[in-house]
Amino acid sequence: MLAHETLALLKSQLNFQAIAGPAGNLTLGRGQLRGSPVHVAIVENRMASGALGAAEFDKLASLFKVVAARQTPLVMYLDSAGAKVSEGLPVLGAFRRMFRAALAMAGSGAPTAVYCGAICYGGASMLASLAGTRFYSTNSRLAMSGPAILAQTAGVSVLDEMFQAMSLASIGAEARTRLSLGNLAVSPTAAIEDLPAAMSAAARHAELGVRLAQIGGAGSARPPEKIERKDLDKLYPAGYALHERDGVLMGEAVCENTSVAVLGLIGGKLLGAARAWRLADMVWKNRTAPPKILHLLVDCESHATTLDDERVMLSAYLANLACALYALGEAGTHIETTVLGKLGGGVYVAVCAPAARVNLLHGAEIQLLPGKAINSILGDTGTQKYEFREYQAAHVAERELKLGLV
């Protein structure tokens, strides 16, 4: 069954009634599932590859808050390439707000299911990864990066037949449904049943770890390396003890006469599935005895754009990291994310949506997407520089740290 046929089936079997007219590519409505009410959100690829702007993200955030409060089931249909990059910083701030509401909804235990359209990329794929169940049509594709960016990373043409076959084998419906019991194929003959119970966030984290171990990507047991840097000296003048292992920063520091736990991603390397899981694992371990304050230090321009990372469903690992941080915050930890260098895209949302505050070191940058990705979508370099007041106005960051560097 193709994606557009799945959408028609959904509307028919749920007895879908739109609440109002479409807002961009988004339509919200209500339906019936076995005689009980269900919320419905439909994102169609009507324009700009189904991209979602700030207005649509804000409507989704409001819906997720209602679902979390009322525990009414939610069914979503997502045929979208993700955020509308042409809107710049405001859409990133709106994405952050929406994803935090989605994390709260997922944490509430409200039953949710996502039916993937022909494309489910970027932010749409992260949102789908929070659902208890994902259903794939025959032509569905789910990934953090679309084929054009994956091909660019591989150094081949997106039209190359061998690459197309490899891409399909990595991000297509058949590949996704083999990965997890939470990924299912749409059946044209089966009626929509009650939504399956969602796996707990901790259990899903464990499953993702097993998936990595099966491909040998869970990380080494090499000893941690002590980290000392000038920016950290200025950030924590009263002292710190930080180490890095397998690309994850960990330790503790003294800030304003208070001991704080520290985790992070530094060095500027793109975030792949294995490192995202290792950081999430450190966060989950902190939850057994939640620290009062956690500082999350990041210098990570964006997510990895390789087929290897997409084969294990990178979107799920970014969503898992966000879930771990959100759970720690709910356990009573005050989380602050501090950008030391560059940060953008889905990684920004994963580490900033759960945070109580986002700090930006003077001279650091937050981007909607890296320049190459912006260029492939909009045809420009994506090198625009922003003043801190613009980040603040867009609710992308709350505080600038100058630390005597200027």
Image: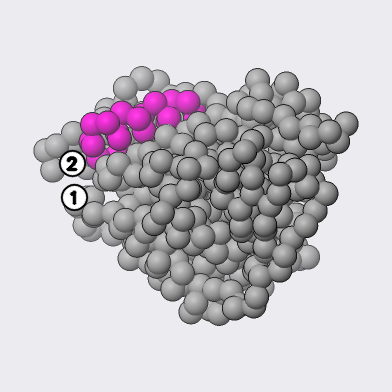
Q: Which corner quadrant holds the C terminus?
A: top right
Q: Nearer the viewer, residue 164 or 51?
A: 51
Q: Residues within 10 Å of mark 2 (few under 14, many from 20)?
A: some
Q: Main secondary structure of the magenta part?
A: helix
Q: Residue furthest right?
A: 406
Q: Which corner quadrant holds the N terminus?
A: bottom left
Residue type (three-letter) at the residue carrying disc 2: Leu
The residue segment tinted magenta is: 56-75
Label ID, residue 33: 2
The residue depicted at 57 percent of the width and 33 percent of the height is 357
Tell me the CA gap for discs 1 and 2.
7 Å
Q: Nearer the viewer, residue 108 or 169?
A: 108
Q: Is residue 140 magenta?
A: no
The answer to whether 371 appears left or right of 199 in the picture is: right
Is residue 250 visible in the rendered structure shown here? yes
Expressed as whole percent of the image width and height from the top left, the position of residue 255 reads 64, 40
Q: Nearer the viewer, residue 32 or 385?
A: 385
The residue depicted at 46 percent of the width and 55 percent of the height is 286
Q: Residues within 10 Å of mark 1 (few under 14, many from 20)?
A: few
Q: Quadrant of residue 360?
A: top right
Q: Earlier in the sequence, mark 1 or mark 2?
A: 2
Residue type (three-letter) at the residue carrying disc 1: Asp
As helix, strand or loop, the secondary structure at mark 2 comes to strand
The residue depicted at 75 percent of the width and 43 percent of the height is 237
The residue depicted at 35 percent of the width and 30 percent of the height is 65
Q: Which residue is mark 1?
A: 194
Q: Quadrant of residue 244?
A: bottom right
Whether tag 1 and tag 2 are in contact, CB under 8 A, the answer is: yes
Expressed as whole percent of the image width and height from the top left, the position of residue 115 reads 37, 49
Expressed as whole percent of the image width and height from the top left, the position of residue 64 reads 36, 33
Is residue 6 visible in the rendered structure shown here? no
As helix, strand or loop, the secondary structure at mark 1 comes to loop
